[in-house]
Amino acid sequence: MSHQRQQRLKPLLNKVPPGFLVDTRWLKAQGIDAKSIHDYVARGWLERVIRGVYRRPLPEGVQAKSAVPWNSALLSLQWIMKYDVHLGGVSALELAGHAHYLPLGVSPRVHLYGDVPTWLRRLPSDAQMAVHRHTLFGDGQTGIIDADGDTRESSQAVNVWRWPLKTSSPERAILEALDELTSEASFEKLDKIFESLTTLRPKQLMALLMACRSVKVRRLFFVFADRHRHAWRKHLNTDNVDFGSGPRVLVEGGKLHPTYRIYVPKSFVPAKDTEVGTDA
């Protein structure tokens, strides 16, 4: 291998930890041409995962899994290839410890929000990647945090790097999850998660509710908030929230919520004598 290629290889290996991914676009941006990529694969310095996507091999003696761990793929997108994408919705809530139950024997469904390369859908992974548009809050980054990215979990063969996962805070994640509600079964699952959200921060909730572009999400959030009456509910002032006008149909055959004017499963409509949350 030429001296010029050796000079390009060292910074590449410094930027890409073992087990992590890069694509052809990123490699070319580092000044590595197609011939060099082919040479690196032939010499075992890179592994071809799928067309246009490569992985730096794990240390000798450590067996790589055929399915790429989803957290390694996401960290590679976020920290190496610099895609504007974060873990959100139910997946972020589960990461924060709000999982109600995890189905056994089924690949987890991982919810990503933002821009991803087209090859992600073809990547052999240990999870089903569900990609959502980054539009619920416009281009705002409110509520996106760095969560512990320890890769010693079972999905990673070796602890080779510590990067934090960019993920939604619970306050943002619950609004993203509400945006995905489609059926009565989804309501029941999210209801169990909402029950555990006892420590949400009112100031961040209000900032996110003001930035949220969906009338449906704002109405649904308060349907659940009034239902569970967590301590933070009394610090939210609905006078500052735009609920739009006219009823919204979400669940066919549902019942109209008397306060927030959205059709939800009948069990989510309060009895007439039920006290709802008190505004500040």
Image (spheres, rainbow, N blue to C red):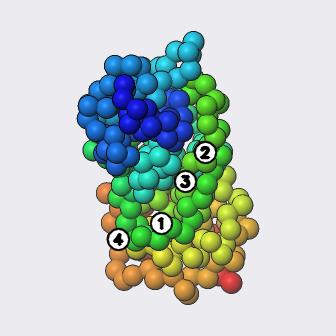
Q: What element carries label 4?
A: strand
Residue beneath disc 4: 248
Q: Is residue 199 above or below residue 52?
A: below
Q: Label 3: which residue?
A: 167
Mark pair 3, 2: CA separation: 12 Å
What is the CA distance from the residue labelled 2 to the residue labelled 1?
A: 34 Å
How far is disc 3 from disc 4 in space, using C-alphas?
Answer: 30 Å
Q: What SS does tag 2 mark?
A: loop
The percent position of residue 236, horizontal first and vertical second, equals 64, 78
Element carrying mark 1? helix
Figure quadrant of residue 2:
top left
Q: Label 1, on which residue?
A: 220
Residue 204 percent coordinates (x, y): 62, 72
| Residue 40 in picture, x, y percent from top left | 37, 26
Type of the residue with mark 4: Arg
Q: How many C-alpha atoms fall within 10 Å of the one at disc 4: few (<14), some, or many (≥20)?
A: some
Mark closer to the chain start, 1 or 3: 3
